[in-house]
Amino acid sequence: MSAAAPDELSELIAFGADWLEPLGAQADVRFEYASLEECFDAPSVIADRLVAQFGFKEIGFNWEMLDASEDASGARAATTVMSDAFEREMVQRQTWLGAERAGTCANAFINAFQPAQRTVLSNRFDGLWNPISDATFEWAFVGFDCRKIALLLVMARG
């Protein structure tokens, strides 16, 4: 990871400007991003390298790679998983963003990365949670292409 030119990261900067406040209404949010110099390691290695850089726990093979293609659907689609994460808040399960806004948020994050190279991972796998922080509840997403990478971590205390 390296220092990045603002134009290279413009989609991620726009995501942060649009979504950190609404997400922060129901959770503590960490949104970190950087340029990515190399994208040829295993996706879990790339994700672990990023989270470790910001002081979070590496979880190795416990990252779940989501289907980030434009026509993805079903339980492992990045849009589905991210929408589910943000539709209702993590503790009481009350409405957070709601279905439509959660889908818009998910698409904004996913579409910040080049479609042909985009990878999105989650720290939840088949209903199991693999925490990277010390929060009571969390959901982490790492997205990257061969130019940039981002961590979107939402956390709550129960």
Image (tube, grey):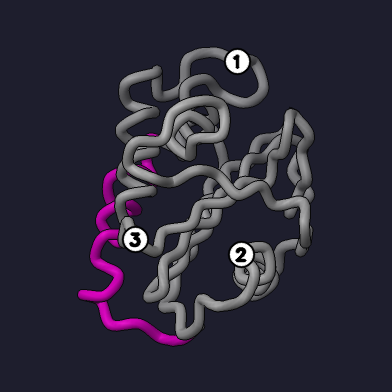
Foreground mark, 2 or 1?
Answer: 2
Q: Which residues are magenta?
A: 2-22
Distance of label 2 from label 1 (alpha carbons): 30 Å
The quadrant holding residue 47 is bottom right
Q: Upstream in the sequence, badge 2 or badge 1?
A: 2
Q: How many marks?
A: 3
Question: Which of the marked residues, 2 or 3, is nearer the chain's N terminus?
Answer: 2
Locate the C terminus and report the quarter of the image it occupies.
Answer: top right
Left or right: where does residue 39 sit relative to residue 4?
A: right
Label annotation for residue 93: 1
Q: What residue sits right under mark 3 in the picture?
A: 116
* In the displayed structure image, the side of residue 51 where residue 11 appears, left or right: left
Name the main secondary structure of what is drawn in magenta.
helix
- Which kind of residue does numbered mark 2 sit on? Pro
Q: Which residue is label 2 attached to? A: 43
Is 99 one of the magenta-colored residues?
A: no
Q: Which comes before the other along the chain, label 1 or label 3?
A: 1
Residue at image position (32%, 56%) is 115
Query: Is 142 left or right of 105, judged from the image as shown?
Result: right
Residue depicted at 67% across the width and 22% down the height: 91
Residue 108 visible in this rendered orientation of the protein: yes
